[in-house]
Amino acid sequence: MELQLKHKKVFISGSTSGIGFAMAQGFLDEGAEVVINGRSGDRLRAAISKLKQSVSTASVSGIVADFNDPKAIDQIKQQLDRVDILVNNVGIFASKSFEETSDSDWLEMFRVNVMSAVKLSRYFLPKMLDKNWGRILFVSSECAQLVPEDLIAYSATKAALLTLSRGLAQTTKGTKVTVNSLIPGSTLTEGAVKFLSDRARLENKTEKEVAMEFFKQTRTTSLLQRFAQPKEIADMALFLASPLSAATNGAAIKVDGGSVPGIL
């Protein structure tokens, strides 16, 4: 399907690996101009090199910015005036019990996961409205609704993104700007690969065995019963970012493999 993304300018926060990287690759495949982001210059350069190898015609650049640093948004403003598509993807988590999760843990996750999206949207959305075209996507998580006991703070930040997304969508009424959120399920990102590898080594099992046990014992509600590939999440993001999705606004789209029970 032709997604009509050619020459659209895209900024994706937290995109040197995982879902963000897969989105960048997908946008480049569609002929968009992509600006990726990471905390480390080395990782950013490596990601850009990999994208250029994958897509020979890639128009890709990068901005180093750590969203735990208040100056990160200023760095982005200095290098980007406007974009057609903003993907608020950056996210961090700490797997700890509620009692062990410190105030600083909470504040750091809210600064990176929520306030980065607030600040980027506040910067780019008015420009989209002036142009009367644009797309903002928020990458939430199944944890916003499932809320694992060791990820309460992270889950709270991902739930906040759903509220932020819906609220901003309401400010676009009657325009060609849309704001939507994605709710991915368990996805085979670098973090998931490390989890499988560490658990397999600890329990003297194969990574495949650990993955199967995860869905049988922990993520029992999953209908997919496997980790999604980052590209499977990215494919939905590309559609929502495209002109073809004009009738979808203010929505929270599940790409969770059926993990979140219910019909809504």
Image (cartoon, rainbow, N blue to C red):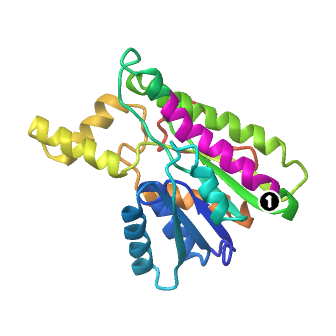
192 versus 85 height, above or below? above
Left or right of 201, for residue 112: right
Q: Residue at x 67, y 58 (%)?
A: 77
Left or right of 18, for residue 138: right
Q: Residue 146, can we see it?
A: no
In percent of width and height, residue 195 lies at 27, 42
- Range shown magenta: 107-127
- Under mark 1, the amino acid is Met
Q: Residue at x 40, y 75 (%)?
A: 49
* Residue nearer the viewer, 184 or 151: 151
177 versus 51 height, above or below? above
**Which quadrant, please, contains the N terminus?**
bottom right
* Residue nearer the viewer, 154 or 63: 63
Residue 263: which quarter of the image? top right
Q: Secondary structure at mark 1?
A: helix
Left or right of 263, for residue 134: right
Q: Is residue 172 magenta?
A: no
Q: Is residue 123 magenta?
A: yes
In percent of width and height, residue 142 lies at 50, 36
